[in-house]
Each structure stands twice: as structure tokens, then as C-alpha cells.
Image: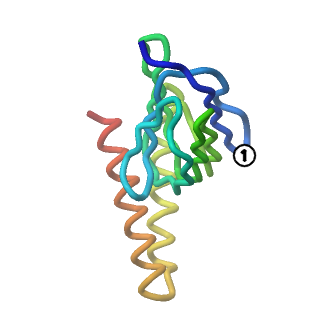
Amino acid sequence: MAENFHFELVAPERLLFSGDVEAVIVPSVDGDLTVLAHHAPLMAVLKPGLITVESAGKAQAIFVRGGFADIRPDGLTILAEQAVPVEELTDDLIDVVITDAERAVDAATDDDQRRVALERLGQLKEVRGLLQS
């Protein structure tokens, strides 16, 4: 049996999760990270995607639009730009987030901004595809 560690997921509007878990899969810009107890210290930038929280043999998925993960040997704290449990996520909300990303692409004033905005748009469309399957 996996050892538990403390996990907190904080969004601007509320604390979405606080408790002991076995594992958390985090969508980082450098690739998905599986965090377990006693993980080496790491700060990670989140990309839009799904966080998977595993506890007591159950998995819970939570959509995040971005943010930061503070991984420590004794726990994990995620500060999310926006976070919504998948069961509360609607097609309308995903469409609004994608429309915002499309506007960011159109508003980009240089190649770097455009590249970042296009990358984020692609990530959001990928999440929409995952949720529709």
C-alpha cells in the first residue's frame, strides 16, 4: 500500500482539496508528474489539463487552467489560476476558456507571445478532447 502525503489545491475562489492522498498526477509544462510521498523538492509550472488525485483506491479528476505546484517531501500544494472538479465542468465553461485563449492568440504583439498563446490554446483543445471521449 502506498504511503499517504498531504495535498492542497487552492484556486482564487476556493480551496478545492485538502487531505491525505496516495498520489497526484500533475500536468506540468515539462510533462505530467506523478507525485508520491517523499518526492524530491520541485517547483513546477502547470499547463491547462487534468489533475488526477488518487486516494483510498479512488481517483478524482480536477481541471486546472494553469498555475504552480510546490512539491515537497512532506506534501504538495497547487496554486491554480482556475480549478474545477470534472463533474462540475460544463461544455460552456470549456468553450469560454478556449474563446479567451483564441483572443490571446489574436492579441499577441510578438512571436513569443503568439507562440505561448497558441501552445495554451492547443492544450485547452486537448483537454476538451479528453473530456468528450
Q: Which residue is disc 1 drawn over?
A: 12
Residue drawn at the location 67% of the way across and 26% of the way down: 18
Q: How is the image coloured?
A: rainbow
Total numbered badges shown on the rendered structure = 1
Nearer-the-camera pick, 39 or 94: 39
Residue 6's quadrant in the figure? Answer: top right
> Dividing the image into 4 quarters, which one contains the N terminus?
top left
Residue drawn at the location 44% of the way across and 66% of the way down: 102
Residue drawn at the location 71% of the way across and 33% of the way down: 15
| Three-letter code, disc 1 | Pro
Q: What percent of the width, then of the height, locates residue 37?
A: 52, 29
Q: What percent of the width, then of the height, locates residue 57?
A: 42, 12
How many neighbours does mark 1 have within 10 angstroms: few (below 14), some (14-19), or many (20 or more)? few
Against 20, residue 57 (above or below) is above
Against 44, residue 74 (above or below) is above
Q: What percent of the width, then of the height, locates residue 78?
A: 61, 43
Against 3, residue 53 (above or below) is below
* Residue sitting at the far bottom: 110
Residue drawn at the location 51% of the way across and 87% of the way down: 109
Q: Secondary structure at mark 1?
A: loop
Nearer-the-camera pick, 114 or 89: 114
Against 128, residue 100 (above or below) is below
> Dividing the image into 4 quarters, which one contains the C terminus?
top left
* Residue sitting at the far left: 133
Residue 131's quadrant in the figure? Answer: top left
